[in-house]
Image: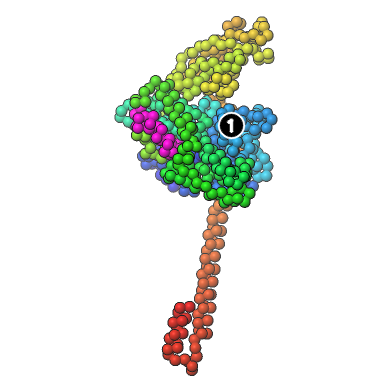
Amino acid sequence: MAETGEQHGPVLIGIDLGTACSGVAVRQNGRAEVVTNGHGGRATPSYVAFTDTEGLVVGDAAKSQASRNPTNTVFGESVVHSCRLLNVLIDPDLRLLRLYSDKAGLKLWPFKVVAGRGDKPMVAANYKGKQKLLAAEEVASMLLSKMKAEAEAYLGCPVKNAVITVPASFDVVQRRATKDACAIAGLDVLGVIHEPTAAAVAYGLHESANDKNVLVFDLGGSHASVSLLAVASGKIAVMATAGDPCLGGEDFNGRMVEHFIAKFKAGHRKDVSRNARAMVRLRAACEQAKRTLSSASWAAIELECFHEGTDFYSTITRDQFEDLNLDLFCKCMEPIKKCLMDAKMDRRSVDDIVLVGGSTRIPRVRRLIQDLFDGKELRKDINPDEAAARGAATIASRGGGDSLLDLFLPDATPRSIGVEEAGGAMAVVIPENTAIPVRETKRTISVQPHHKKGVVVSVFEGEKPRARDNTLFCELELPGAHRGAKPGAKLPVSVCFSVDADGVLTVSASDKVNGHKKQMRFMEQSQLRKKEIERMAKEAKYMAEDEGNKERIKAKNSLEEFLYKKRRAIEDEKRKVDDALCAVEEMIQKVPGDQVSSAGELSDALKKLMIE
């Protein structure tokens, strides 16, 4: 049990929910400590599995059985960031997902994602003999529950309150989905903090005596995010944020997977891409190879009985890995350039460069960043996998609420906010990286009335030219605005946006013909109804019993395994003793009779027996 000497009252933790691995930390004895899980690791794989025997399995245990149970093992961004399940399109024919981006990783997922109620993407899994459809928030809550349980086991006391980190590129819907997942897991959220900001806190940059500009580069499993922070008088302000939500370590793994699929096909004339079990094993091997190549010049892929009884052995060098992914590595540099441009800052004005996320260990990525900043030294003295969790724990130790305002200055809008014009184009009203608060910003747009609803003003967040490719914020209806208008006519509508210091967006719209007006205040509205969250929380509690039962089964299996090993050891010793007794008896029988043997003959017999 750990002592949390600094805290009084409820214990507050920090959770970094990652697409590859997740971590939890607590502030104690003057520093943030990363919690060690039940398997002795400081990071828990972001895997959730459903089995016939053990029910729900999360983390290391889920990852270890993935190759045996591929279609019911959920991993990657679909576990953690519901953004990937919210930013998708349902194919009306196949009822499968098609990402807006050209990301190839989805087609390699062995588990199913289907359309649920209202075309909401759902993960389909067999749970105790029945198919169960799970929302992304539900799956994420299972991992959060695991992190909560690990913290409670480490601390020896209940945990209720947490600060959660999310990528800087998360939009308001994704942040709300994260909060919903926490609610399902029984966690009260003190704050949802950007990973780069949390990392800066982990490095203690907010305690610097000098004002400085800090660039945080976060390369996780499924995203590349960059934030430019200004640190002054102990406070942190976000000056600009940029990123690519469809680029990360899993994409680098994917390039290796495709490389070895082609290599296996060329060598054995067999296509392994449709073998779900083999693909899970290959992806795991490629992930391990990527980690190895960060410190070694080559890595081996060794998979016995890989496909249709055929073994697969191959190697990959660091140079080959870099050649496969060089275009993606270079693409990771684009958010850095955009961030500097949006902040109107010269790269020479950056004082510190902080690395976050496991993929920042890749040597070529580090060299590209250094080249961009004329060889500037990178801050990497904290494990990049742990920086966000450590920072979240430090922020949590301040107690959340108003105390967080003492640490952070007003933020900036991470993405553009605008409305849909007639024809479907996105008309930006508040550009991305606009400092908050934002005073009233007006714009006149053309809207084609809906035949039933009248004039509908649809508000979106994002950078795509087509409004519907972005995230829908809200819709304002002006019911009588279209009266008297000719069919197909486009009506002029004035929209006004403002964002207060708390990030609350106020949208008002009025048509210039009939004078109809409407206003709406938009916060982080949940995509789930309150009853849905309550239902999911009850089911999560029930399913969490599987985790507890799994631990009981694991302990029972460990005890049985120990006893069986002990019995085998004793039986082996008994066999050795029996063999020794038999050997001695044989030796006794071989001793020549006294009447016919001389001393020399007896000595020779002894020597012979000793040799035997």
Kindly identify the residue that appears in the image at 56 percent across and 43 percent down.
263
Q: Which residue extends farthest left?
A: 209
Q: Is residue 561 above or below residue 343?
A: below
Image quarter for residue 197? top left
Q: Nearer the viewer, residue 249 or 147?
A: 249
Residue appearing at x 50%, y 34% in the figure: 248
Which residue appears at 42% of the width and 32% of the height?
217
**Residue 48 or residue 394, whichever sits in front:** 48
Q: Position of residue 168 (x, y in %)?
A: 47, 29
- Residue 24 at x, y = what percent? 46, 40
Q: Amino acid at mark 1?
A: Leu
Q: Is residue 485 above or below residue 522?
A: above
Give the SS element for disc 1. helix
| Residue 200 visible, this angle | no
Is 11 situated left or right of 233 in this image? right
Q: Is any atom of residue 311 visible in this view?
A: yes
Near-viewer residue (216 or 545): 216
Residue 197: in magenta span: no
Within 10 Å of disc 1 (Cα), the crowding (few <14, some 14-19, many 20+) is: many
Instruction: Indicate whether residue 356 is drawn in magenta.
Output: yes
Q: Find the magenta span and give its range.
A: 350-376
Height in image: 21 above or below 484? Answer: below
User: What residue is shown with label 1?
Assistant: 85
Q: Is 278 on the left or on the right of 346, as rendered?
A: right
Percent coordinates x, y for residue 357 in the rendering = 45, 36
Residue drawn 52% across the image and 40% down it: 256
Residue 36 position by quadrant: top left
Q: Nearer the viewer, residue 258 or 192?
A: 258
Q: In the image, residue 494 lies at what x, y percent?
A: 55, 10
